[in-house]
Image: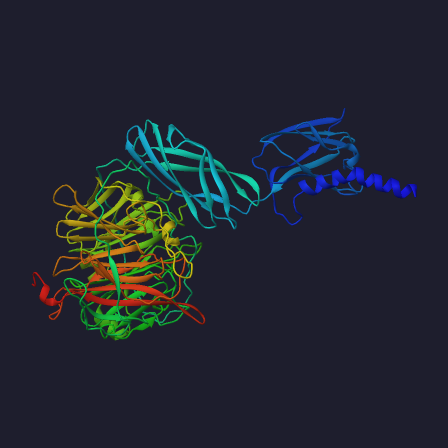
Amino acid sequence: MKDRQMIKILFIILAPFLTLTTIFLPAASADMTTIFGPVTYTRAAGSPQTFTETFSHCGTASCQIVVNTGTAKSMDRTTSASISINGSEIIRPNDFRQQLSEIIRPVVLEDHNILTTEIRSKPGSFLVIEVQCTSSNVTLASRGSGVNLLDADTLLSALRIRNFGTEIAENVEVTSIALTDGTLTSPLPPLNLDTIPVDESAVLNLEFSGDFNPLGTHTLTVEGTYVSRDATYCFNLSEDLEIPPAAPGNRVLGVVNVTSNINDGFPYEIRPPAFTSAVNPPRWIVPVAPFVPGTPTELSTGSEPVPLSTLLTASIQNATPVTIFEANTGGINGGTVANTSTTAEPSGASDGNGVVFVTGNWFASFSTDGGNTFTPINPTAVFPADTVGYCCDQIVQYVPSIDRFIWLLQGSTSATQAGGYRLASSSPAQIRSSNATAWTYWNLTPQVFGQPNGTGFDYPDMSVGNNYLYLSWDAGFGCPTGCTQGFQVARILLSEIQAGGTIGIGFTNPADGRMAWGAHISQNTLDEVFWAGHNNNSSMRVFTLAEDSNSYFWRDVGISSWPTGGLSSTTPDGQDWLTKLRDFPGNSVHGLTRVGSSLWFAWSVGTNENFQQPHVEMVTLNRQNDFDKIQQVQIWNNDYAFAYPALSTNFCTSEVGLSLEYGGNGNYENHVIGFWGDFVVYITTGSDVGTTRYGDYVTIRQEPPTEDNPGNLFSAFGYGLNSIATGTQTDVRYVLFGRPASRCIIIE
């Protein structure tokens, strides 16, 4: 009876300590992160030896100390020692028993900690000590930045913080912000960024004072905390901000020659596209500048459905003047799930005489009957498995002056492939006779442009001038040592492409165009090509390259402020179809066209007090009057979002044609087309399922003039998504639309 009472008393005495152990010991299944050690301590001869270490810790996650005393048969095993943290003895001499090779104890840590270890065993005995804390399933990291000199003493920056982990980061708070050689003026910490969901981001817009210069590099450091599973964790981010070159400025083009190849081995072995998640990272985040007022466009843009049929000749009467539809063809990508991505990125062109060539992720198709029917081909079977490879993005143009289709295919960067682009050329007659398998091509690897192995090229574009073909891409999505990162433009004489031999390429320095990351180049560009990026949300940097010059130029142009945030729009099934856009291409200028001396620039923007839905911002500049702003307008509707604008110029009427995407707020994402100024767009697809991976561009081309249609039509390429039994099917569309020929102002 006494023994039972003693056991009961002993249990009561020990119960609180057992409870403490349960509270502080991390769960057995929890992943642990080492914050100190492992460090080995060996006792020397003489008196018992004491070792002292310091280490830091941030947060409230459960932690433990792990002590390895050696194997059971080890002659150097420690049998007596004392270990303390911050003056509190955690492990006592009696805890070192001969049969224990490892001792684990919970510990409560401070921001700065002192670890004291006294080994009392014989000389030569040792301990291995490690401090671990429960790991976080949140990973916060920088995901792109932007920097702009508002003046010599004021630097604006934007830093995107992304959650790459597997759990939500709650109550994210920035506690410290520092910039080398700069002083933070606004906003001052602490800053609450609220919650950052998985694969989502928050953007810090900051202003610093100091003595700054173009091309200077300043390290931005951001520290803070977040909560995950009721524990507080800390983060520390660092990003080098390199200030862009001063404006106005200019640089001479680089020059290189590339020899041609002929794909005389068709069909080549079919290979799966080498697509990786590393493509399309954001590199430039637009800083927010002091507000510059503007006048919002008063009229919203409505939407109307177009019947989904193969051939449409009926006029649509609601637009003024009349918009006509000649064709709206689906099934271009073979109607399958396997060969097309939900990020379709359709591109294409027509020769005006029956041949249409269309591409997307990861397919190509051609028509010889004006788009009534299409025949799919596999891009990997058309070209050999060489150093370029094949990844994803493709761009197509038709050049009437040399009667050639031009096909640009993005390669894949890996340990065995250089990547870059394959530029291919074929005439309409060759496409008819070979079923689109006869091409002359040039391999444009990053090394051609002086980049080291491992440099990634991505997000291409292509346009046609009077005498040159123009190409563009983002250089350095993978950027090893020695890589130059930024936006790059190249040009090639059309006559050299037509000849099919060696081509000479003039190219820009990517670093000059870092703020144009994710941009496209101007269509219908005539004797000069243009591209642009945002210094901040009220200043554009516009680049020009004239055909009679071997130098390109840039200058800054002030515009009215536009909203950088709020790029979010939800489909009826709860999918935010602008998720990908928020990350990339973001606010990049990817709609550009030239109308005489007027330059049109368009990009996707968010929401503010004037616009309740994401919308498209458009600015028109006067090329002949020092790039003065002619107008700043918006494509908007408070009932749904617009995004991904592509622009082209109508040869007959000099109007701007539109190809873009709309959706959200009760609408699925769909392709729409129209004319600026009609304030109505026409829905060409019938999506019935949402996605968070939509984009990253659609296309519009001027249809080559014919006797019946002398420059009054556009070819547009977009897509929708449909749910089928085996998954989501991508429906790529070829749309031929325009004004009646009778409305042509000038027909030559």
As drawn, which residue projects farthest toward the right? Answer: 1
Quarter of the rendering containing residue 714: bottom left
x then y, percent, for residue 616 = 27, 52
Who is closer to the viewer here, 511 or 334? 334
How many numbered dots are placed on residues in this image? 0
Q: Residue furthest top?
A: 47
Q: Quadrant of the N terminus?
A: top right
Residue 151 image position (x, y, % from top left): 27, 31
Colouring = rainbow
* Residue 402 in view (yes/no): yes
Q: Is residue 261 visible?
A: no
Percent across and percent down for residue 341 are: 39, 63
Query: Which quarter of the figure is the C terminus placed in?
Result: bottom left
Q: Is residue 275 above or below residue 131?
A: below
Query: Which residue lies at the image location 71% right of the left edge and 36% below the top edge?
Result: 127
For image coordinates 32% across by 64% down, the residue present is 719
Decide which of 65, 683 is in the foreground and name it.
683
Query: Vertically, is 616 above or below 402?
Result: above
Residue 479: image x %, image y %?
Answer: 40, 46
Q: Quadrant of residue 49?
A: top right
Q: To which quarter of the image does residue 431 belong?
A: bottom left
Q: Answer left or right for 677 relative to 132.
A: left
